[in-house]
Image (tube, grey):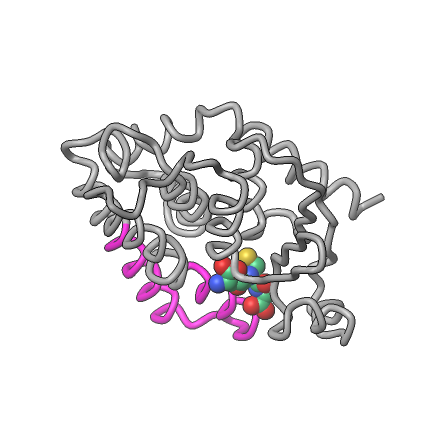
Amino acid sequence: MLKIYHSPGTRGFRTIWICEELTVPYEIVPVNFAADYRAKPEWRAMNPVGKVPVMQDGDMIMFESCAMTQYVLDRYGEGRLQPAKDDPSYAHYLQWSWFAEATFARPLGEIVNHRREFKPELDDVVAEMKSRATTCVAALDAALADRTYLLGETMSAVDLSICYTTRGYRRMVTENLPATFQAYFDRVTALPSYDATVKADADTAEKLKG
Ligand SMILES: N[C@@H](CCC(=O)N[C@@H](CS)C(=O)NCC(=O)O)C(=O)O
Protein backbone atom coordinates (compact mmCIF):
# COMPACT_ATOMS: atom_id res chain seq x y z
CA MET A 1 0.00 0.00 0.00
CA LEU A 2 1.15 3.57 -0.66
CA LYS A 3 2.57 5.28 2.40
CA ILE A 4 2.23 9.07 2.59
CA TYR A 5 4.55 10.69 5.13
CA HIS A 6 2.56 13.73 6.07
CA SER A 7 2.54 16.62 8.53
CA PRO A 8 -0.89 18.20 9.15
CA GLY A 9 -1.75 21.19 6.97
CA THR A 10 1.15 20.65 4.56
CA ARG A 11 1.46 19.59 0.93
CA GLY A 12 0.85 15.90 1.63
CA PHE A 13 -2.78 17.09 1.55
CA ARG A 14 -2.47 17.06 -2.26
CA THR A 15 -1.37 13.44 -2.36
CA ILE A 16 -3.99 12.29 0.14
CA TRP A 17 -6.72 14.11 -1.81
CA ILE A 18 -5.75 12.51 -5.12
CA CYS A 19 -5.76 9.05 -3.48
CA GLU A 20 -9.16 9.77 -1.93
CA GLU A 21 -10.61 10.96 -5.25
CA LEU A 22 -9.23 7.94 -7.13
CA THR A 23 -10.02 5.57 -4.21
CA VAL A 24 -6.43 4.39 -4.23
CA PRO A 25 -5.60 2.74 -0.87
CA TYR A 26 -2.99 4.58 1.17
CA GLU A 27 -1.66 4.81 4.68
CA ILE A 28 -0.58 8.04 6.37
CA VAL A 29 2.64 8.04 8.36
CA PRO A 30 2.47 11.12 10.62
CA VAL A 31 5.63 13.23 10.50
CA ASN A 32 6.72 15.61 13.25
CA PHE A 33 7.08 18.96 11.44
CA ALA A 34 9.53 20.40 14.01
CA ALA A 35 12.63 21.71 12.22
CA ASP A 36 14.96 19.72 14.46
CA TYR A 37 13.18 16.47 13.54
CA ARG A 38 13.30 17.29 9.82
CA ALA A 39 17.04 18.01 10.16
CA LYS A 40 17.77 14.54 11.57
CA PRO A 41 19.70 12.11 9.35
CA GLU A 42 16.78 9.64 9.47
CA TRP A 43 14.44 12.21 7.88
CA ARG A 44 17.11 13.57 5.51
CA ALA A 45 17.42 10.00 4.23
CA MET A 46 13.77 10.28 3.17
CA ASN A 47 13.90 13.88 1.95
CA PRO A 48 17.42 15.29 1.49
CA VAL A 49 16.24 18.90 1.89
CA GLY A 50 14.30 18.12 5.07
CA LYS A 51 10.83 18.95 3.75
CA VAL A 52 7.52 17.10 3.72
CA PRO A 53 5.77 15.22 2.16
CA VAL A 54 7.40 11.96 1.15
CA MET A 55 5.70 8.99 -0.48
CA GLN A 56 6.72 5.34 -0.48
CA ASP A 57 5.45 2.64 -2.81
CA GLY A 58 7.21 -0.63 -2.07
CA ASP A 59 10.95 0.07 -2.40
CA MET A 60 10.36 3.41 -4.14
CA ILE A 61 10.65 6.59 -2.08
CA MET A 62 9.99 10.01 -3.59
CA PHE A 63 9.44 13.64 -2.62
CA GLU A 64 7.76 16.64 -4.38
CA SER A 65 4.00 16.65 -3.98
CA CYS A 66 3.05 17.33 -7.61
CA ALA A 67 5.41 14.59 -8.85
CA MET A 68 3.76 12.28 -6.33
CA THR A 69 0.34 13.23 -7.72
CA GLN A 70 1.47 12.43 -11.25
CA TYR A 71 2.95 9.10 -10.12
CA VAL A 72 -0.34 8.09 -8.47
CA LEU A 73 -2.28 9.11 -11.60
CA ASP A 74 0.03 7.25 -13.96
CA ARG A 75 0.43 4.14 -11.85
CA TYR A 76 -3.05 3.77 -10.36
CA GLY A 77 -5.35 6.28 -12.07
CA GLU A 78 -6.42 4.11 -15.01
CA GLY A 79 -6.74 7.24 -17.13
CA ARG A 80 -8.89 9.11 -14.64
CA LEU A 81 -8.34 12.80 -13.75
CA GLN A 82 -5.86 13.53 -16.54
CA PRO A 83 -6.22 13.99 -20.30
CA ALA A 84 -4.49 11.62 -22.70
CA LYS A 85 -1.19 12.93 -24.11
CA ASP A 86 -2.79 13.45 -27.54
CA ASP A 87 -5.77 15.35 -26.12
CA PRO A 88 -5.85 19.10 -27.02
CA SER A 89 -6.05 19.96 -23.30
CA TYR A 90 -2.86 18.07 -22.39
CA ALA A 91 -0.55 21.10 -22.71
CA HIS A 92 -2.73 23.10 -20.34
CA TYR A 93 -2.93 20.13 -17.99
CA LEU A 94 0.87 20.36 -17.72
CA GLN A 95 0.77 24.16 -17.49
CA TRP A 96 -1.65 24.29 -14.54
CA SER A 97 -0.02 21.31 -12.83
CA TRP A 98 3.27 23.19 -12.67
CA PHE A 99 1.61 26.53 -11.98
CA ALA A 100 -0.06 25.13 -8.82
CA GLU A 101 3.28 24.57 -7.12
CA ALA A 102 6.00 26.46 -9.00
CA THR A 103 4.18 29.78 -9.44
CA PHE A 104 1.11 29.96 -7.17
CA ALA A 105 2.42 28.11 -4.09
CA ARG A 106 5.85 29.71 -4.28
CA PRO A 107 5.08 33.19 -2.86
CA LEU A 108 2.88 31.57 -0.19
CA GLY A 109 5.74 29.29 0.83
CA GLU A 110 8.05 32.31 0.93
CA ILE A 111 5.70 34.04 3.38
CA VAL A 112 5.84 30.99 5.66
CA ASN A 113 9.64 30.75 5.39
CA HIS A 114 10.11 34.47 5.86
CA ARG A 115 7.92 34.55 8.98
CA ARG A 116 9.89 31.65 10.42
CA GLU A 117 13.29 33.29 9.84
CA PHE A 118 12.63 37.02 10.32
CA LYS A 119 11.13 38.36 13.53
CA PRO A 120 9.64 40.88 13.21
CA GLU A 121 8.68 40.10 9.63
CA LEU A 122 9.56 42.59 6.91
CA ASP A 123 6.19 44.01 5.82
CA ASP A 124 7.38 44.89 2.31
CA VAL A 125 8.54 41.34 1.65
CA VAL A 126 5.25 39.84 2.83
CA ALA A 127 3.25 42.42 0.84
CA GLU A 128 5.22 41.60 -2.31
CA MET A 129 4.59 37.86 -1.89
CA LYS A 130 0.88 38.44 -1.24
CA SER A 131 0.72 40.55 -4.38
CA ARG A 132 2.39 37.81 -6.44
CA ALA A 133 -0.08 35.23 -5.12
CA THR A 134 -3.00 37.56 -5.86
CA THR A 135 -1.77 37.90 -9.46
CA CYS A 136 -2.03 34.10 -9.68
CA VAL A 137 -5.60 34.16 -8.36
CA ALA A 138 -6.52 36.81 -10.96
CA ALA A 139 -5.02 34.60 -13.70
CA LEU A 140 -7.02 31.62 -12.49
CA ASP A 141 -10.21 33.67 -12.26
CA ALA A 142 -9.74 34.84 -15.87
CA ALA A 143 -8.94 31.31 -17.09
CA LEU A 144 -12.18 30.03 -15.56
CA ALA A 145 -14.40 32.71 -17.15
CA ASP A 146 -15.76 30.37 -19.85
CA ARG A 147 -15.44 26.97 -18.17
CA THR A 148 -16.36 24.89 -15.17
CA TYR A 149 -12.90 23.45 -14.51
CA LEU A 150 -9.45 24.57 -15.62
CA LEU A 151 -9.43 22.18 -18.58
CA GLY A 152 -13.04 22.76 -19.59
CA GLU A 153 -16.09 20.77 -18.50
CA THR A 154 -14.15 17.79 -17.12
CA MET A 155 -12.50 17.96 -13.72
CA SER A 156 -8.87 16.85 -13.57
CA ALA A 157 -6.11 16.50 -11.00
CA VAL A 158 -5.02 20.10 -11.63
CA ASP A 159 -8.25 21.33 -10.05
CA LEU A 160 -7.44 19.49 -6.84
CA SER A 161 -3.86 20.73 -6.85
CA ILE A 162 -4.85 24.37 -7.47
CA CYS A 163 -7.53 24.20 -4.76
CA TYR A 164 -5.00 22.81 -2.29
CA THR A 165 -2.79 25.86 -2.94
CA THR A 166 -5.86 28.09 -2.66
CA ARG A 167 -6.39 26.87 0.90
CA GLY A 168 -3.02 28.45 1.72
CA TYR A 169 -3.93 31.63 -0.14
CA ARG A 170 -7.18 31.96 1.85
CA ARG A 171 -5.28 31.40 5.09
CA MET A 172 -2.35 33.72 4.39
CA VAL A 173 -3.65 36.41 2.06
CA THR A 174 -7.46 36.73 2.05
CA GLU A 175 -10.61 34.63 2.13
CA ASN A 176 -12.15 36.98 -0.44
CA LEU A 177 -11.72 35.32 -3.80
CA PRO A 178 -13.00 36.80 -7.08
CA ALA A 179 -16.52 35.53 -7.82
CA THR A 180 -15.74 33.05 -10.61
CA PHE A 181 -12.81 31.59 -8.76
CA GLN A 182 -14.81 31.40 -5.52
CA ALA A 183 -17.57 29.41 -7.28
CA TYR A 184 -14.91 27.06 -8.70
CA PHE A 185 -13.22 26.63 -5.30
CA ASP A 186 -16.62 25.86 -3.72
CA ARG A 187 -17.40 23.35 -6.49
CA VAL A 188 -14.13 21.44 -6.17
CA THR A 189 -14.08 21.46 -2.36
CA ALA A 190 -17.67 20.13 -2.31
CA LEU A 191 -16.27 16.74 -3.40
CA PRO A 192 -16.66 14.04 -0.73
CA SER A 193 -12.94 13.30 -1.28
CA TYR A 194 -12.15 16.79 0.01
CA ASP A 195 -13.99 16.19 3.30
CA ALA A 196 -12.26 12.83 3.63
CA THR A 197 -8.90 14.54 3.13
CA VAL A 198 -9.66 17.24 5.68
CA LYS A 199 -10.57 14.47 8.13
CA ALA A 200 -7.42 12.47 7.36
CA ASP A 201 -5.35 15.62 7.91
CA ALA A 202 -7.07 16.32 11.27
CA ASP A 203 -6.66 12.67 12.32
CA THR A 204 -2.94 12.94 11.58
CA ALA A 205 -2.73 15.98 13.86
CA GLU A 206 -4.48 14.01 16.63
CA LYS A 207 -2.08 11.09 16.25
CA LEU A 208 0.90 13.41 16.54
CA LYS A 209 -0.55 14.95 19.71
CA GLY A 210 -1.30 11.58 21.28
N1 LIG B 1 7.86 21.67 -3.85
C1 LIG B 1 7.80 20.86 -2.65
C2 LIG B 1 7.71 21.82 -1.46
C3 LIG B 1 7.80 21.07 -0.15
C4 LIG B 1 7.65 22.05 1.01
O1 LIG B 1 8.08 23.22 0.95
N2 LIG B 1 7.03 21.56 2.08
C5 LIG B 1 6.85 22.40 3.24
C6 LIG B 1 5.59 22.01 3.99
S1 LIG B 1 4.16 22.21 2.97
C7 LIG B 1 8.03 22.19 4.17
O2 LIG B 1 8.43 21.06 4.40
N3 LIG B 1 8.60 23.29 4.67
C8 LIG B 1 9.67 23.25 5.60
C9 LIG B 1 10.83 24.04 5.15
O3 LIG B 1 10.87 24.51 4.00
O4 LIG B 1 11.74 24.19 5.95
C10 LIG B 1 6.58 19.92 -2.72
O5 LIG B 1 5.64 20.24 -3.45
O6 LIG B 1 6.59 18.86 -2.08
Against 51, is 157 above or below? above
Q: Observer-nearest residue: 111 or 52?
A: 52
* Quarter of the image where one finds residue 106: bottom left
Seen at 78% across and 71% down, the residue is 42
How many numbered circles are shown? 0
- The quadrant the C terminus occupies is top right
| In the image, farthest residue toward the right | 210
If the picture is divided into quarters, which one holds ligand 1? Answer: bottom right
Residue 209 appears left or right of 110: right
Magenta region, main secondary structure: helix
Residue 148 appears left or right of 119: left
- Judge whether residue 110 is colored magenta: yes
Residue 85 appears left or right of 29: left
Residue 183 percent across, percent down from the top left: 29, 28
Q: Observer-nearest residue: 45 or 78?
A: 78
- Judge whether residue 21 is colored magenta: no
Seen at 61% across and 60% down, the residue is 52
For the magenta stretch, what is the residue range?
108-136
Seen at 22% across and 41% down, the residue is 141
Residue 198 appears left or right of 178: right
Against 50, is 191 above or below? above
Q: Observer-nearest residue: 66 or 137?
A: 66
Seen at 23% across and 43% down, the residue is 89
Residue 185 percent across, percent down from the top left: 36, 33
Residue 170 percent across, percent down from the top left: 41, 44
Residue 30 percent across, percent down from the top left: 74, 50
- The quadrant the N terminus occupies is top right
